[in-house]
Image: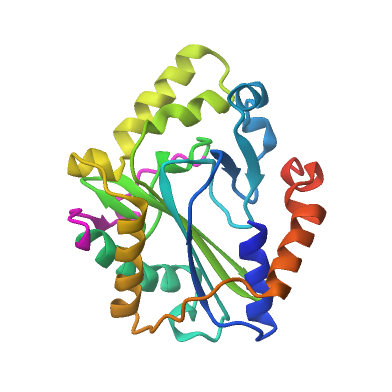
Amino acid sequence: MAVDSAILEAVGDEKTLPTLRLYSWDPPCLSLGYAQPISDVNQAGLHARKWDIVRRPTGGRAILHTDELTYAVIGPKREPRLAGGVLESYQRLSLALLKALHTLGLPVQTISKAKSDIDREQPVCFEYPSDYEITVEGKKLIGSAQSRKKEGVLQHGTLPLWGDLTRITQVLCFSNEEKRSLAATRLLAKATTVETVLGYRISWEKAAEAFMEAFQETLNIEFIFGDLTSEEEQRAQELVNEKYAQPSWTERI
């Protein structure tokens, strides 16, 4: 999260280009949405599993990051592909996401608000699809959230490649075990993974290649591959120390 924020600041200062960043997580990490209460988290469950926790600068509900590809799109508001409101830019970026998943053989589509059945009181992000998010036969496959700051736009999203989606219910709070079990059942009815849809696993590298090719083709982009600048690395470490590793941020709500 600190790296994404450091890139966003650099973009705002015109010190770096608009960026597509693709990454994974080790160890697994529970991320809370910007405005999600820390009371949703079962801290004992997290500690027992030695999983990390972080609060995202973007919205939405809790996600357990493991066995997945995470993407971040970062750029200035004047960038034509990110221009307009949240839904307008979501729709534009969703075209690239759809192309990537079609390339991988997934029969995906975007969902419109009229089709969604949203219960925003649930703590799990993948329990409900939002506008222009990616679904397969009504089940959510990619969860995305966007933040629009003075520096520019940051959109996060995650593609579960394989694994048990219900693991997240073990590190969230429920009033009793029956409700935890019901949440797990509900989650499997509303969300899925790439492996579940295809019947076999694809590697992180293959998924990342599909994302890069789809963004280039769909959004008419030519990528320049590169590492973080020394300034971005330094700022990311500062943001870890000042913000993202601090209870004052993670537990602020």
x then y, percent, for residue 176 = 54, 13
Q: Quadrant of residue 118?
A: top left
Observer able to see residue 28: yes
Image point 63% across, 30% down: which residue? Answer: 41
**Residue 149 in sight:** no
How many marks are shown on the rendered structure? 0
Q: Position of residue 94 (x, y in %)?
A: 35, 66
Between residue 79 and residue 53, name the one nearer to us: 53
Q: Is residue 108 left or right of residue 121?
A: left
Residue at 18% across / 54% down in the picture?
107
Relative height, residue 149 to residue 157 (above, below): below
Q: Of 115 and 164, which appears nearest the observer?
A: 164
Q: Most extreme residue toward the top, as rendered? A: 177
Q: Nearer the viewer, residue 142 or 162?
A: 162
Q: Residue at x 34, y 80 (%)?
A: 219
Q: Residue at x 33, y 46 (%)?
A: 140
What's the image's color scheme? rainbow
Residue 248 vs 16, above or below: the answer is above
Image spot of residue 56 (x, y percent): 62, 52
- Above/below status of 200 relative to 42: below
Which residues are the magenta region? 103-120
* Main secondary-structure element of the magenta-colored stretch: loop
Instruction: Decide if residue 21 is on the left or right side of residue 49.
Output: left
Residue 148 point in image, percent of width and height = 60, 70
Q: Which part of the image, by quadrant, shows the N terminus?
A: bottom right
In the displayed structure image, the side of residue 228 where residue 144 appears, left or right: left
User: In the picture shown, does residue 180 fall above or below 151?
Assistant: above
Out of 230 and 116, give the one closest to the viewer: 230
- The C terminus lies in which quarter of the figure? top right
Q: Is residue 110 magenta?
A: yes
